[in-house]
Amino acid sequence: MKNRGSVAIIGGSMAGLFAAISLRSLNFNVHIFERSAGDLRNRGAGIATHNELYDALETAGVKLKTEMGVQSNGRVMFDNQGEVVHRVEMKQIMTSWGLIYRFLRKQIPEENYHSEHCLKNLSFSRNSVTASFTNGDSIATDWLIGADGARSQVRQIVAPTITPIYAGYLGWRGLIDENLLPKEVLDELSLQMAFGMAPGGHWLGYLVAGPNDALNEGNRWYNWGWYRTADSDSLQNHLTDATGEFHRTGIPAHLIREEVITTMRAEAKKFLAPQIEKIIESTSAPFLQPMYDFSSKQLVFERAILIGDAAFTARPHVGMGVSKAAFDASSLAQALSKNNPASLGEWESSRLKFGNATVQWGRDLGSYLGPKASDPESLKKAEYYMKPETLLSITAASEPQQYLRLKT
């Protein structure tokens, strides 16, 4: 097959890998440029799968493994006394970011993946775009894809007015060896997604693959997250390290002040079920994630194109970040292969519509988190989404398409 041209991908995470795999399958010459050193295998945590994710993997040309995670048979809500107050049946595979990342990364030759390449600038000509990097390297290519996440350097260059918006809450997260949990707690919570409610937000957790993608009992990890309302002062307190430095977009786990963690553990003991409190207590190194979202109004900028979280970042409640990145990438590869401006325009229009719907759904799901609404309509929405029957059924749902308000 004839070579279809060259593509430089900025960002070597999920969206970048999906794009590279899809484009290589159509005979494009593809190189990935990742700003971090080494690989990204230890980043991210749990992912609830759904049919759209599997469809996206297959569309991208990825051969699926028989087992992609740990089976969950349903969802359960505990009150602060540890009693079950609601159940929802929902069979779902709970996988991990690292498992999917490693699965994809193996399909990209080492000579096509370039670490420690931080984008500095872009320059455009009629038929090409040149990327220059802070290490002095540069590359001229037919197309450039910005797949470098929510803090995208590509987006900062081509659309500098688009910035992530703080949602008014943050998430405590943890990933812990299941053997470190009390057996009676693990027995009660395994093979299901567990939830707990507390003032200002909910907690959820489930088992995922462990080291080396192990799925067998005794070798898995337990993944959990606790969403907490945090105004600007509280956010600054949580993200300020012992030296007084404020890490606005996220603080490294080892820099979180001990007194902040101690306060969180005390609040867990006060507000959450004893089973959940024991999981948090057993997690030696919890980490923090401030919640931001944003929408792009444009995805194609001459010969630079945004996909994945660089284009739209939705709140994690939707559970669609990976599948959205995969469909962005695979559908873009098909559009570029047609070598027709109209095809690229149709792709942009379709993905803008999908991205906006996904961000809006994330905002709906998080409507009772963050600053309390004052208008009746917003209060009614918040009340609906915090009901146990709604929260358990819709959060990272196994069939998310039914909840997206896609305008035809």
Image: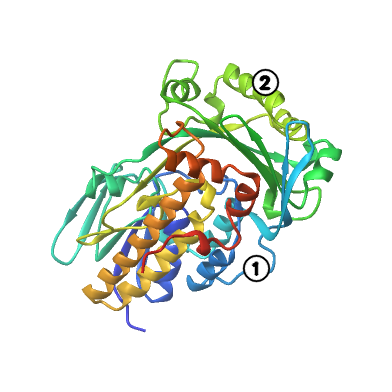
Residue plotted at (66% across, 24% down)? 265
Q: Indicate how the structure is coloured in the image.
A: rainbow
| Residue lying at the far front of the rendered structure | 376
Up-down: is 138 above or below 109? above
Q: Which residue is mark 2?
A: 266
> From the viewer's perspective, is 305 left or right of 22?
left
Give the mark nearer the N terminus: 2 vs 1: 1
Q: Position of residue 217 (x, y in %)?
A: 81, 51
Return the residue nearer the eye: 156 or 372.
372
Up-down: is 119 above or below 301? above
Instruction: Name the image quarter holding residue 22.
Output: bottom left
> From the viewer's perspective, is 204 left or right of 182?
left
Q: Position of residue 333 (x, y in %)?
A: 37, 71
> From the viewer's perspective, is 144 left or right of 70?
left
Q: Can residue 158 be seen?
A: yes
Return the residue nearer the eye: 275 or 58.
275
Residue plotted at (61% across, 69% down)? 64
Calculate the distance from the C-alpha at mark 2 to the C-alpha at mark 1: 41 Å
Tell me the crowding category of disc 2: few under 14, some 14 to 19, or many 20 or more residues within 10 angstroms, Cα based. few
Q: Which residue is mark 1?
A: 65
- Secondary structure of residue under mark 2: helix
Q: Which quadrant would the C terminus be assigned to in this image?
A: bottom left
Residue plotted at (73% across, 30% down)? 277
Q: What is the count of numbered marks?
A: 2
- Secondary structure of residue under mark 1: loop
The amino acid marked with disc number 2 is Ala
Q: Position of residue 231 (x, y in %)?
A: 44, 25
The amino acid marked with disc number 1 is Lys
Disc number for residue 228: none
Up-down: is 195 above or below 350? above
